[in-house]
Amino acid sequence: MRKKSIIFLFVLFPLVIGLACRFSSKPDPTATPTEEPIAEVTTEPVEKPTKTIETQEPEGPASRPPQGAGDIAILEPSAWYQDDSEVFFGYLFENQSADVVYEGVEFTIGIYGVSGNLIDSSVIRLPFFYPGTTHGIATSFWLSDEDAPVDDVDISWTFTGKSSPGTSENPFTAESVVFWENRGYPLITGKIVNNSSNIYTDLRADILLYNAAGDVVGGGSTYLDFILADDYMGFTTFADAYDEVVRVEAFPTFNYSVSIMDEADYMYGVSVVEDQYREGDFGSLEGGLIIKNETDIVLRNIYVYVTFYDEDGFITTTGSDYVNLLLPGDTLGLSPWITSQPDETTTTNYDILLLPFDKDDNYELDKNPFRVDNITLTGDSSKSALVEFTNTYSKEVTEVDVYVLAYNEEGEIVGGGDTWTSDSISSGGTGEVEVWISYDYSETIDYVEAWVTPSYWTKFK
């Protein structure tokens, strides 16, 4: 799969996305090579940050006596840590049954003070726990000063039903999971792979970190808006680490609000007509993209996902955005928020995924009624744009969204932003909104393009 260069990019023709696809281009041949990933990490001190690649789980971890229903056991690597006001909980569980899927599993975690008082509790829900598999849970509690210190942690679990493993199985696996030291602000990146022919929305993955002795020494969790059939989604998340990390393991699964989609129902045409990303000051990734509804259908709930890679194909970071409404033939400029990339790597390319989730046959409009009249750069170093627009519709309108993309003199996207206004705008009336721009400050903004569009909250009077 081709990926886009992080430095230079131009698009001659729009790429129409039937349902959803991974939009990418050739790697940049001029990109600076990065270090080879360290597949074998030792406990010897290192002088520079390293990345830890997911390896195989040690064989045969011992288990504690079960503290809940069913053949579910806690495995010995589990641990919890307190660091000032944060209490981290990282436990590894195993379904020791060979032929039972436990449904609706609820893990209840309680933390207690020195006098035995319950300080706080949390419930982690697992829709399905498959036979002969392990699942990790990573979560944190945040305490007030009077709650510290924590003296003990208790966990119990229940389930609501059982089923045969022949009726369902976990379609998700994790690949290329990497722990980045990131100068004391640990990050975890990787891929969640969908091994089924279904499209799913709303997934989660808990992640555990291990030291050389095989003990849990930290972790984190992440959520995904969607995953395509027989494809993967990249993820990035910050983590807690309380010792030197030599191994990382991710546990992807369904979230309780998961939806399953039929591909045949989602063959809508959306295109990426322009996109550009670059590395800016302090290693940030700045840029944006323009999408277009190529159909005569009102599309709703469009997910936009940008995945960034180093030259070895490891994911460095991700960015995402959500579009509530895209009218027929309309375009929209987006600048998704992007998690900072790890300090010890260099991003060289990226790809873009789009998923039109639904259509709206009963929406009041079939074309965008808002006309952008003028855009003025404002603020120090042109960090904002004042967008003036007119409501050409026959009704008063309230609540609209405003998006901008900033360009340099060469016509390359260097950043963007978005905001909203709750002001009422009469038919034929005008409005103005100031939008803050996130961009590569080493560049000079030459001009800005803007889009005004109805939002989820828009009312017509």
Image (cartoon, rainbow, N blue to C red):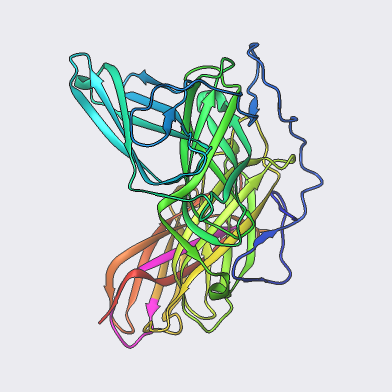
Residue ID at (46%, 22%): 63
Is residue 66 placed above or below 433 in the rendered structure?
A: above
Residue ID at (37%, 69%): 455
Q: Could you say where residue 280 lies in the image, as x and y percent from the top left?
A: 60, 43
The one of 283 and 16 positioned closer to us in this rendering: 16
17 relative to 216 in the view: left or right: right
Q: Could you say where residue 440 lies in the image, as x and y percent from the top left?
A: 57, 46
Looking at this rendering, what residue extends furthest in the bottom direction?
Answer: 394
Which quadrant holds residue 64? top left
Is residue 56 placed above or below 114 in the rendered structure?
A: below
Residue ID at (58%, 38%): 189
Q: Quadrant of the C terminus?
A: bottom left
Residue ID at (53%, 26%): 209
Evaluate whether residue 393 shows in this view: yes
Looking at this rendering, what residue extends furthest in the right direction?
Answer: 29
Decide whether residue 402 is among the magenta residues: yes
The one of 32 and 66 positioned closer to us in this rendering: 66
293 relative to 106 in the view: left or right: right
Q: Which residues are magenta?
A: 390-407
Q: Could you say where residue 460 lies in the image, as x and y percent from the top left?
A: 29, 80
Is residue 430 placed above or below 417 in the rendered structure?
A: below
